[in-house]
């Protein structure tokens, strides 16, 4: 897409036309050290294009390039930085007359209080400015506490100052709920599959695809790393009466990838759960890089092969289903796989266990592998404390409790195995390095 962008390419911008002072301060003091001055300039110029209606007219990139004065290549690099940090979403559309047009959705920066509660943001900022300046910014934006010692609170309560009729409030709850929903920011997952091109190719073969089946193809594309042309080949082979048979298509892909996995080795770095420092170790950095470049099915196959096992059909379907929900990018799904099979050392991926972790990560809005690793560290620290407390409570409880019904372990949680030993992990890491070298040579 970037190679097709020209100064004459049309674009439009959507978003909030104004930022409050707190968000402006966040952009200047917190985001700018991370994204750089050119990315900040691009953000501010795009923001200035937005009218009070929340969108801009159709504009040409030539005007934008003249305003930021840094050239097309530098603008694209600045745009990528805004996209990567979560300040910009970019969409494209093919027009028969205008060619490619772009739509930029500006995302407001985090408020300072939310920024400093995000471990990844704190890490990125401190890496750029150093710990001393980082602490100065913490003090600058930390919520100020009003000293109240020795003072009497005489503040009036809500009901003392305002008239409130509960019956009338209850009668309008549906209206208020509807109003609430109108102000929810829609979450749009960026697709890496070129559906415009793919659908054009399908038309050449007189093939049709049901709209609800697009999510399934999207999941297969993500899971196996299949590009548009390879997917088209599978679609043609699995078609019947000009209709793509999704079940047949999936079976063809699974069979093909299982055969290839025997011939070509893919190895991944296993997560090291012992490093609980505030920085990412070299092993963790390698895990992050691999999670971003290896499709989930290959990632699953590699870990299973390292452990001397194999992936089951149920595991493949579980990962497919998770990807079809568009909750996480591939990289986060890979970290989740690594967490279950390596850190927790489960023999197989259990459906209930996978859903429980995925739900937790989705509610915590984990969208980057770095965030997943930081959360895993914190969760395991809490788990150690919780187990210690439970052992003490259980020891005391056994003295006083009578008979108690106990649920079967397979209902409460999947079977536990001992965590991987440091010696075994070191051996697996050695083999992984060899596989990675082979992967790089191929």
Image: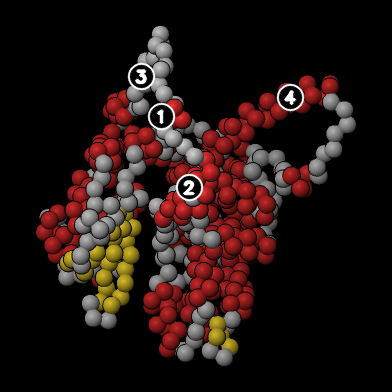
The label on residue 19 is none
Instruction: State the residue position of label 3.
Output: 146
Q: What element does badge 4 sit on? A: helix
Q: Earlier in the sequence, mark 1 or mark 3?
A: 3
Q: Is residue 123 above or below residue 105?
A: above
In the displayed structure image, the side of residue 164 where residue 98 appears, left or right:
left
Mark 1–mark 2 contact, CB under 8 Å?
Answer: no
Camera-side mark, 3 or 2: 3
Compute the Cα span from label 1 to label 2. 38 Å
Q: Is residue 265 visible?
A: no
In the displayed structure image, the side of residue 78 where residue 369 appears, left or right:
right
Instruction: State the residue position of label 1.
Output: 161
Camera-side mark, 4 or 3: 3
Compute the Cα span from label 4 to label 2. 33 Å
Q: Is residue 322 visible?
A: yes
Q: Earlier in the sequence, mark 4 or mark 2?
A: 2
The label on residue 365 is 2
In the displayed structure image, the side of residue 211 where residue 349 appears, left or right:
right
Q: Residues within 10 Å of mark 3 (few under 14, many from 20)?
A: few
Q: Is residue 46 above or below residue 8?
A: above
Camera-side mark, 1 or 3: 1
Q: What element does badge 2 sit on? A: loop
Please state the horizontal and vertical placement of residue 114, each as a whole percent of the image: 39, 37
In the displayed structure image, the side of residue 257 where residue 218 appears, left or right:
left
Residue at the image point whose x is 37% and y is 15% from the top: 147
Q: Earlier in the sequence, mark 4 or mark 3?
A: 3
């Amino acid at each position: 897409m970037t190679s097709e962008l020209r100064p004459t390419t049309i674009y439009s911008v959507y978003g909030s036309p104004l930022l409050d002072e707190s968000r402006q301060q966040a952009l200047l003091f917190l985001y700018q050290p991370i994204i750089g001055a050119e990315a900040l300039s691009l953000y501010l110029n795009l923001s200035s294009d937005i009218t009070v209606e929340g969108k801009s007219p159709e504009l040409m990139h030539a005007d934008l390039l003249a305003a930021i004065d840094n050239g097309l290549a530098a603008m694209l690099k600045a745009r990528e930085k805004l996209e990567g940090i979560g300040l910009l979403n970019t969409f494209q559309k093919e027009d028969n007359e205008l060619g490619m047009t772009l739509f930029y959705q500006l995302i407001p920066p985090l408020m300072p209080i939310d920024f400093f509660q995000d471990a990844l943001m704190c890490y990125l900022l401190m890496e750029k400015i150093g710990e001393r300046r980082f602490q100065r910014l913490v003090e600058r934006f930390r919520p100020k506490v009003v000293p109240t010692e020795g003072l009497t609170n005489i503040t009036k309560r809500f009901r003392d100052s305002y008239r409130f009729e509960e019956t009338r409030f209850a009668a309008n709850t549906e209206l208020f709920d509807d109003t609430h929903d109108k102000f929810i920011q829609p979450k749009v997952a960026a697709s890496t599959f070129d559906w415009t091109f793919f659908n054009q190719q399908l038309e050449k073969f007189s093939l049709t695809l049901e709209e609800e089946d697009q999510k399934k193809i999207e999941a297969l594309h993500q899971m196996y790393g299949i590009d548009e042309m390879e997917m088209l080949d599978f679609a043609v082979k699995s078609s019947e009466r000009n209709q793509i048979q999704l079940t047949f298509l999936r079976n063809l892909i699974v069979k093909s990838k299982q055969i290839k996995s025997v011939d070509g080795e893919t190895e991944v770095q296993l997560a090291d759960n012992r490093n609980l420092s505030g920085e990412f170790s070299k092993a963790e950095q390698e895990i992050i890089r691999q999670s971003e470049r290896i499709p989930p099915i290959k990632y699953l196959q590699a870990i299973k092969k390292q452990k001397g096992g194999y992936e089951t059909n149920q595991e493949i379907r579980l990962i497919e289903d998770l990807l079809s929900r568009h909750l996480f990018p591939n990289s986060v799904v890979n970290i989740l796989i690594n967490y279950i099979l390596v850190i927790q050392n489960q023999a197989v991926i259990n459906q209930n266990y996978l859903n429980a972790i995925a739900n937790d990560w989705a509610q915590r809005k984990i969208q980057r592998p770095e965030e997943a690793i930081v959360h895993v560290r914190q969760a395991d620290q809490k788990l150690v404390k919780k187990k210690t407390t439970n052992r003490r409570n259980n020891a005391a409880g056994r003295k006083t409790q009578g008979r108690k019904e106990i649920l079967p372990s397979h209902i409460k949680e999947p079977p536990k195995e001992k965590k991987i030993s440091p010696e075994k992990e070191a051996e697996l890491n050695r083999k992984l390095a060899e596989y990675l070298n082979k992967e790089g040579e191929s």
